[in-house]
Image (spheres, rainbow, N blue to C red):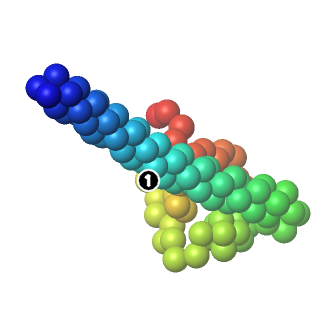
Amino acid sequence: MNRSIFTILLLFAWLAASNVFWVIKLNNGVAEHVLMRSSLDAARKVALQSFAVISEAASENATRQSVIDAAVRVRPGTDPYVKEGFVWIGDIGLRFDEGDKLIEAKSAADPP
């Protein structure tokens, strides 16, 4: 009788440990999915802003303000600010020359 009780307790402990393992694995998978989704959304927003900026900057009558407005339209509610010579709108930075022509754009994810 003692041997069967020991075997049942051993199997129960193994089942509990297995369930804990799968709960942890599932939890890690959910967290990884959330992080990937967040990263994908951020990359998508930068790509959409980039396309809007390229499209506007390519037009003949593009101005500094029209390029900035094009980037803001993609990210409404984002206030542009200037830092280190770049006008930042969300996660994209735009640099203009003295003639207000776009000369450089970079992502916040780019290394300095």
Residue at the front extreme of this rendering: 1
The vertical placement of 54 against 6, above or below, is below
Q: Is residue 83 left or right of residue 10?
A: right
Determine crowd level at label 1: few under 14, some 14-19, many 20+ residues with C-alpha closer than 10 A: few
Q: Is residue 89 left or right of residue 12?
A: right
Image location (x, y in percent) of residue 7: 22, 26
Image location (x, y in percent) of residue 31: 42, 48
Which amino acid is tagged 1?
Answer: Lys
- The foreground one among 53 and 44 is 44
Residue at the right extreme of this rendering: 60
Image location (x, y in percent) of residue 32: 47, 43
Q: Residue at x 46, y 59 (%)?
A: 82
Residue at the left extreme of this rendering: 2
- The foreground one among 18 and 76 is 18
Q: Report the number of discs.
A: 1
- The foreground one among 101 and 24 is 24
Q: Is residue 11 left or right of residue 87?
A: left
Q: Is residue 47 visible?
A: yes
Can you say which quadrant of the picture contains the N terminus?
top left
The vertical placement of 59 against 17, above or below, is below
Q: Residue at x 52, y 61 (%)?
A: 90
Image location (x, y in percent) of residue 79: 49, 71
Residue at the bottom extreme of this rendering: 77
According to the picture, the residue beneath numbered tag 1 turns out to be 83
- The foreground one among 104 and 106 is 106
Q: Is residue 32 left or right of residue 44?
A: left
Q: Is residue 53 visible?
A: no
Q: Residue at x 34, y 40 (%)?
A: 19
Rendered image quadrant of residue 50 = bottom right
Q: Secondary structure at mark 1?
A: strand
Q: Residue at x 75, y 62 (%)?
A: 52
